[in-house]
Image: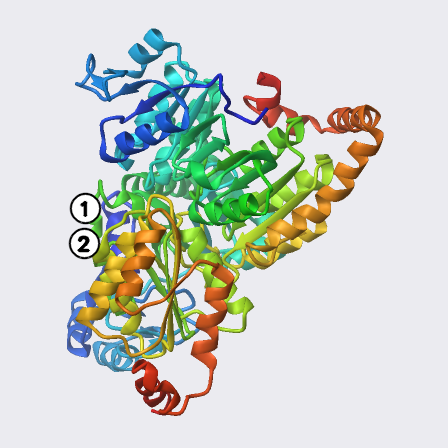
Amino acid sequence: MNIHEYQAKDLLRAEGVPIPAGEIAATPDEVEAIARKLAGPVVVKAQVHVGGRGKAGGVKLAKTPQEARAVAMKILGMQIKGLTVYKVLVTAAAEIAHEAYVGIIVDRAAKKPVFMVSPAGGIDIEEVAAKTPEKILKLPVDTRYGLAPFQASQLGFFLYDDVKKVRAAAKIMQQLYVAFMKNGCSLAEINPLVVTPKDDVIALDAKMVIDDNELDRHPELEKLRDATAEDPSEVQARAASLTFIKLEGNVGCCVNGAGLAMATMDLVKFYGGAPANFLDIGGSSNPEKVVAALKIITSDPNVRSILFNIFGGITRTDDVANGIVTATKQNPLKVPIVIRLTGTNEEIAVKILKANGFSAMTDMDEAVQKAVQLAVSPSRSPVNSSRSPVIPSEARNRQS
Amino acid sequence: MSIFADKQTTLIVQGITGRDGSFHSKQMLEYGTRVVGGVTPGKGGQKFENKVPIFNTMRDAVRATGANASIIYVPPVFAADAIMEAADAGIKLIVAITEGVPVLDMTRVYPFVHEKGARLIGPNCPGLITPGKTKIGIIPGRICAPGRIGVVSRSGTLTYEVVYQLTRAGLGQSTCVGIGGDPINGTNFIDCLRGFEEDPETDAVAMMGEIGGTDEQDAAAFVKQFMTKPVVGFIAGQTAPPGRRMGHAGAIISGSSGTAAEKIAAFEAAGIGVAKRPKDFVELLRVRLKPLRKGAAAKGAATKSATAKKRDDQKARRPKSATTKSRTNAGRKR
């Protein structure tokens, strides 16, 4: 789960990380009021879950409250990489003598959190890693023992020569590590970590990603989720315990299991189509999940055909069939559906589907090809489609 | 033979009275798995299905039954503790089915299990099956058939899809292992590939990877250097957008790394047959098995010993790091 900069800063402040004062605002009026309170130059920063905000014009310096109001009017409502800015962080501007990068990620190969620090901060760390890897220090931490003081100071000495700054940085490393562990993060970043002309070491930006698997034991973190930053269909899917990711294509996919769901999307592309989504209904056999899944898929106006690909292991295919029947009775489909199912209770499932006017396939490739064909084929004449009432409305959708 | 588990494997089910645990324990018993005990704290002394004794702790269960393997069906927040309890009780093969274990938990569990000398498979995995002998997990027994293809995968249902197609095409399996879809798991592709390379009853390997991380790239390097047996691979997630978690916690393209394209390129560079579709496994494996089978039939034992010799040469060439990395080397253990 991504959280915003201002939320990450709050979590870091709670551990004692020095961060310039700031407040969150949703309107130009609020921005002006906060700037007045901060009494001095401020930085107005777009709060969206995406990198490169500065380059996109989402971060602006303002010397007066009036100027802050003016830049806020530009930033609020702007689009950054497809995301709308609803909130801005108004924070006291800091003078910068030096910028460094500090981050922790869970490293899959090391199977540990790994600190990454670089005196070349403020820019894209992937770029530093690619061009000048010698400017990055990587330090794995054994979570059973935590970050040892000598490790923290090793990180500090990689950034600075002056021992006073090293000590300040080492303290921040410890605080960052505590915040990382306490909040179940998979990533925590301070970029840039800044030295001011007065030699203070402070964090100017913060980013944290929380492991979704931690949310059960940290219900307080779930409150940090910003539903406005996500696609509405994804919010709806999460409420129904479905894993759903919206894509740009027109073949709506409903699959059980993440690997098979990805493979199904890939196969749609292989046969010349484009998947409209990733959707994993999971291992359980709950017909209600299927109903919710169909509702979400059909709410996407791009979808021209729907493809079910179910391999029944734990999932009972008859439950899926019942779900399809229930869902389509509630909301008759406007686009054609292709159902492939095989495995547990397949015979019962096929019987249920046939009794309700659906046909079922057993071969994954054939089903995908058919779904792709239905999505890309030119609109049929009403005469041909009289047998299946779903086609004319599909043709209408296409013309609009 | 097989890798990791066979008829000698005796199993404790951790969480045997839970919804998933009880359902799959019945399935495993039906398949012929030697389920010798279960653990549910507070239910010690009772019996599961009137025959399998239930214990309060893993220590009690191992003492009473002498079991050498365990399977975990407990909820995510308790899974890390259950894995450590099993390793502490002396279990050597721990299979964690549970999905949703926090990754920071695994950073503590992994070194603990490693130091106890145990092998962990999973978490977030379907377990393993040695068709006709034993199954430890949730892979449906009826889609498998005994045979000589080793299967290893990060996925569940995609594995079933491929195994089902193999079985229908007459290509049975020696062992199928689901290593799980999490970013930190106990057993990786290389552990399984090494096991299959050393298993005399495996002729070829089918591996199913997916986006995220570098496990497949590492596996490709291993195949190129050390494997004499043919390997065919598939990567799921070619159409996945970057930065999104595709169901599995580990299936995510971070920045520009972990893409399907780079994994497929690594496979190709290592001489691994690349299945573009799940159904391509059958043909790619058949083509690679033909010369093997012909050779074996024509030259009989002579060919066999030559292959064995090649394997010994390869072992001798193995860099130190590769051998020391293997913890409980399955081949050696048997």
Marks 2/1 in contact by CB < 8 Å: the verdict is yes
Residue A305: x percent and y percent? 38, 74
Residue positioned 59% across, 26% down in the render: B326
Q: Position of residue A26 (x, y in %)?
A: 19, 72
Residue drawn at 28 percent across, 33 percent down: B23
Q: Which mark is residue A219?
A: 1
Give me the chain letter of mark 2. A
Element type at marker 1? helix
Residue type at the position of mark 1: Pro
Q: Nearer the viewer, residue B31 or B259?
A: B31
Q: How many marks?
A: 2
- Tell me the element at label 2: loop
Image quarter where the C terminus of chain A lies is: bottom left
Label 2 packing within 10 angstroms: few (<14), some (14-19), many (20+): few
Query: In the depicted view, which residue is nearer to us: A293 or A393?
Result: A393
Q: Crowdedness of circle 1 by 10 Å Cα count: few (<14), some, many (20+)? A: few
Q: Is residue B120 above or below residue A239?
A: above
Three-letter amino acid code at the position of disc 2:
Lys
Front one among B150 and B209: B150
Q: Quadrant of residue B11?
A: top left
Residue A223: assigned label: 2
Q: Is A102 placed left or right of A271 in the picture?
A: left
Relative to B204, A145 lies left or right = left
Quadrant where the N terminus of chain A lies?
bottom left
Tell me the tag on residue A149.
none
The x and y percentages for residue B97 are: 37, 35
- Which residue is at the far top? B64
Q: Chain of mark 1?
A: A
Residue A231 placement: quadrant: bottom left
Q: Is residue B67 something that shows in the picture?
A: yes
